[in-house]
């Protein structure tokens, strides 16, 4: 099993380097001069040239690439063109916020998705199953930004129960610990819901199908023949096997969660990686765009790696590969 | 069993066939019901009647659109007439073939799939809704009550709620007289109002009249006379006074075309790449699959945003980028299918006959892989529409003033509580479109799956 894990890890490394290369060349082969931001009739051309040299933009492309790759490896992502701060600092502030959202959304996805999927499978073809299937379909088909807006409209503007944006209230620093915690929770509810519910709907559908397929297997029939109660048969034997593909599915959902965070953070003004990315893209802030793209891709690769390893732990048939 | 011969019934007589033919000339579909194809006949009749009444009812706009209209209007008019002509000729064709007993209620793969699909009610509904959306998109110049960019008199028409113009307030006086009024307001002992306009083209009355409150018995509401003459804002207006329903109808064209074309490009390219990768195997396969893995690692939105923001957001670029980021799934699918089919005997036989590689791929292997590809394509249109809407929402899609569903929702953010209708209705349109595509795709997948056959 260890060989499997090590092999997978080793394959990821050239993948990540390849990702960095792809990102770099996409950004730099585009029209649009990053120096255009600084273009100003007062600044003489010599100063512009100096700035360009300073930012390293005058070097030929492959030299820029090698320099960038080597400083990347050391963790130096450069300086943001618009914020004039090291990109690493910007990311260090933003990524934990995004991780909060993504992690909780993943939790929502797994818990709600599995539970609803199991209920739907157990009560197959009843009214409960049909209504769950229809609801899941509708949720699955909603644009997340629209869902977010509608929730804000309902819960913040009309009912006033939940705050509409940001991570905490303005006067949060003055709160005691429990009040702050509660404040944080109320700010988290809607973004996490918007981010996670669509994947939860997908997981529920998949879980239902997976469990139904597992129930038809011969070993389930054997378990029933042995005289075990239906509950034990379904939950102990059936569910365990049906959950295994969910691991892979969750790994597949990671890019969607990270991408979904772009929209969700924009709607809820959540200070995370997605909002930073959108701002940087609009402002042609190349270092930040490069860094964010790369980090997102690396997170996905790691997530898939984790999913693969977990899968091999759960399913002995894979390890012999 | 050849048609015309329905088990238990006698074949149609010469007379019946002639009647069916003549009936089909005047009312397509009626003849088919006579010959035993009742369901198809009914649908054709309904469709024909709907389209013809629409054309006749809107004949002035249709004819002027055809002759002097813009490209949109010409396309819409031609589409309308083509659909009517198509229904008519298809009905005649079917009647003639049925009459001669030529249509076989066969059991080919396609026939079985069609039968299974028809049993799946939600899937059929999905298909009907999808077709309806395309019809609406093509006929939008004739269906939209207002011009999507027309602002009219902004002061009076901005931020109107849904169903504006439908109702009219009526002041009922003690002596039984009824006054049609607008802006009825009560201030203390007096009730002020503006007399409602009677004719469509009249300018609204500016003077505020007042009545003593004691003279008024009640204030009623009734349908404004002539409300069907298309100046009701069914879904309200936006910040600039533009009708939301018309904008949604015109916006559907953008969403549907982006969805269709982008997925078409993605599927074509993906099939091509997957076929090469699967058939040749070895290093080529390795390199291609590594590339696929790399691109798949990026969240799609990041890639699309980056690529579109690097150039300017034009509709063809959006379609190209969406296509370029969506081909990977199809490539993997096709590759997998080809890998499994490569070892089967019919491929070896084709080789033994001396057929070239390319021919083997395209004419022998690919047709067997079509089914899952089509299902994937249908399901992907839904997600492509969602991504395109998100793009428009962020400001990187079609630019205003062109209406696109994401655009309208973005503009609705400004006044979310006060003018909730601007953000709500385009979102509902997106939801129903994507739901319809998903139902259709799921139904197609279940119909093609041999394990689910009854």
Image (tube, rainbow, N blue to C red):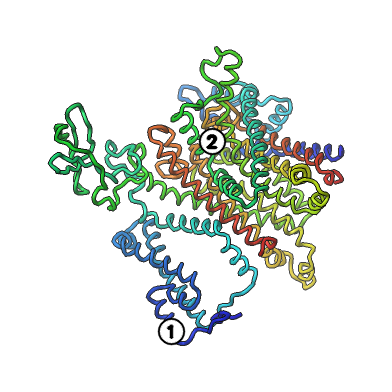
Q: Residue at x 57, y 81 (%)?
A: B8
Q: CA distance from mark 2 to mark 1?
A: 71 Å
SS label for mark 2 = loop
Q: Residue at x 45, y 39 (%)?
A: B409
Residue A81 appears in the figure = no
- Mark 1 surroundings within 10 Å by alpha-carbon count, few (fewer than 14), some (14 through 19), many (20 or more): some
SS label for mark 1 = helix
Compare residues A245 and B122 and report the one nearer the observer: B122
In the picture shown, does residue B374 fall above or below B159? below
Quadrant location of residue B423? top left
Query: Which label is found at residue A32?
Result: 2
Compare residues A125 and B326 and report the one nearer the observer: A125
Side of A274 relative to A215 (left or right) = left
Compare residues A296 and B158 and report the one nearer the observer: B158
User: Which percent across, then down, holds residue A215?
Assistant: 74, 51
Quadrant location of residue A236? top right
- Mark 2 surroundings within 10 Å by alpha-carbon count, few (fewer than 14), some (14 through 19), many (20 or more): some
Image quadrant holding the N terminus of chain A, namely top right
User: Which percent across, then down, holds residue A201?
Assistant: 61, 43
Contact flag, marks 2 and 1 (Cβ < 8 Å): no
User: Which percent across, then down, holds residue B218?
Assistant: 21, 38
Query: Which label is found at residue B4?
Result: none
Side of A226 relative to B2 (left or right) = right
Q: Residue under circle 1?
A: B18
Chain letter for the residue marked with disc 2 in the picture? A
Compare residues B296 and B352 and report the one nearer the observer: B296
User: Which percent across, then down, holds residue A262?
Assistant: 57, 34
In the picture shown, does residue A230 fall above or below A77? below
Quadrant location of residue A110? top right
Residue B75 appears in the figure = yes
Side of B131 relative to A81 (left or right) = left
């Amino acid at each position: 099993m260890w060989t499997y894990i090590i092999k997978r890890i080793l394959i990821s490394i050239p993948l990540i380097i390849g990702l960095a290369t792809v990102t770099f060349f996409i950004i730099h082969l585009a029209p649009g001069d990053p120096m255009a931001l600084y273009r100003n009739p007062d600044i003489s051309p010599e100063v512009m040239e100096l700035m360009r040299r300073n930012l390293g933009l005058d070097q030929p492309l492959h030299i820029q690439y090698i320099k960038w790759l080597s400083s990347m490896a050391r963790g130096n992502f450069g300086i943001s063109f618009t914020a004039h701060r090291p990109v690493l600092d910007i990311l260090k502030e933003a990524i934990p916020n995004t991780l909060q959202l993504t992690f909780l959304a993943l939790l929502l996805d797994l818990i709600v998705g599995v539970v609803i999927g199991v209920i739907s499978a157990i009560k197959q073809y009843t009214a409960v199953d049909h209504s769950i299937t229809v609801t899941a379909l509708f949720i699955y088909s909603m644009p997340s930004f629209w869902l977010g807006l509608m929730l804000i409209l309902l819960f913040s503007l009309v009912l006033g129960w939940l705050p509409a944006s940001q991570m905490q209230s303005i006067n949060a620093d003055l709160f005691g610990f429990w009040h702050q915690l509660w404040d944080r929770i109320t700010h988290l509810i809607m973004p996490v819901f918007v981010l996670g519910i669509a994947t939860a709907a997908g997981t529920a559908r998949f879980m239902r199908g997976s469990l139904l397929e597992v129930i038809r297997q011969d070993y389930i029939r054997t378990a029933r023949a042995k005289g075990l109660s239906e509950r034990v048969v379904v939950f102990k034997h059936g569910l365990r096997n049906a959950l295994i593909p969910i691991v892979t599915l969750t790994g597949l959902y990671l890019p969607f969660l990270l991408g979904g965070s772009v929209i969700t953070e924009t709607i809820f003004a959540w200070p995370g990686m997605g909002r930073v990315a959108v701002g940087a893209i609009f402002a042609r802030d190349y270092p930040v765009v490069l860094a964010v793209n790369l980090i997102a891709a690396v997170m996905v690769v790691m997530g898939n790696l984790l999913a693969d390893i977990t899968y091999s732990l759960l399913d002995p048939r894979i390890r012999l590969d | 069993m050849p048609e015309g011969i329905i088990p238990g019934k006698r074949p149609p007589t010469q007379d019946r066939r002639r009647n069916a033919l003549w009936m089909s000339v005047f009312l397509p579909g009626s003849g088919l019901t006579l010959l035993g194809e009742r369901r198809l006949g009914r649908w054709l009749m309904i469709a024909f009647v709907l389209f013809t009444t629409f054309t006749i009812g809107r004949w002035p706009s249709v004819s002027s659109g055809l002759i002097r209209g813009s490209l949109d209007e010409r396309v819409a008019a031609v589409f309308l007439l083509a659909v009517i002509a198509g229904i008519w000729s298809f009905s005649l064709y079917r009647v003639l073939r049925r009459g001669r007993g030529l249509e076989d209620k066969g059991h080919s793969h396609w026939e079985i799939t069609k039968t299974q699909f028809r049993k799946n009610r939600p899937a059929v509904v999905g298909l009907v809704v999808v077709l309806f959306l395309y019809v609406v998109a093509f006929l939008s110049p004739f269906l939209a009550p207002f011009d999507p960019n027309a602002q009219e008199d902004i002061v009076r028409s901005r931020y109107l709620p849904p169903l504006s113009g439908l109702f009219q307030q009526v002041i009922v006086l003690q002596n039984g007289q009824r006054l049609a009024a607008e802006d009825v307001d009560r201030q203390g002992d007096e009730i002020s109002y503006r007399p409602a306009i009677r004719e469509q083209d009249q300018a609204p009355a500016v003077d505020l009249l007042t009545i003593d409150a004691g003279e008024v018995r009640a204030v009623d509401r009734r349908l404004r006379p002539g409300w069907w003459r298309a100046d009701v804002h069914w879904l309200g207006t936006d910040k600039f006074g533009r009708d939301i329903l018309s904008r949604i109808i015109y916006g559907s064209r953008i969403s549907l075309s982006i969805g269709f074309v982008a997925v078409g490009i993605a599927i074509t390219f993906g099939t091509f790449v997957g076929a090469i990768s699967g058939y040749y195997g070895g290093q080529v396969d390795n390199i291609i699959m590594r590339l696929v893995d790399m691109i798949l690692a990026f969240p799609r939105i990041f890639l699309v945003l980056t690529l579109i923001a690097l150039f300017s957001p034009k509709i063809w670029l959006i379609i190209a980028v969406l296509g370029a980021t969506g081909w990977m799934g199809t490539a993997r699918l096709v590759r997998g299918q080809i890998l499994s089919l490569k070892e089967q005997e019919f491929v070896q036989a084709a080789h033994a006959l001396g057929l070239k590689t390319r021919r083997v791929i395209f004419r022998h292997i690919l047709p067997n892989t079509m089914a899952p590809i089509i299902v994937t394509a249908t399901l992907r249109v839904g997600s492509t529409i969602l991504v395109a809407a998100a793009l428009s929402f962020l400001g990187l899609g079609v630019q205003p003033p062109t209406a696109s569903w994401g655009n309208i929702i973005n503009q609705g953010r400004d006044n979310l509580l006060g003018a909730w209708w601007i953000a709500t209705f385009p979102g509902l349109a997106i939801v129903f479109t994507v739901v319809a595509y998903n139902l259709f795709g799921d139904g197609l997948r279940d119909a093609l799956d041999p394990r689910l056959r009854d």
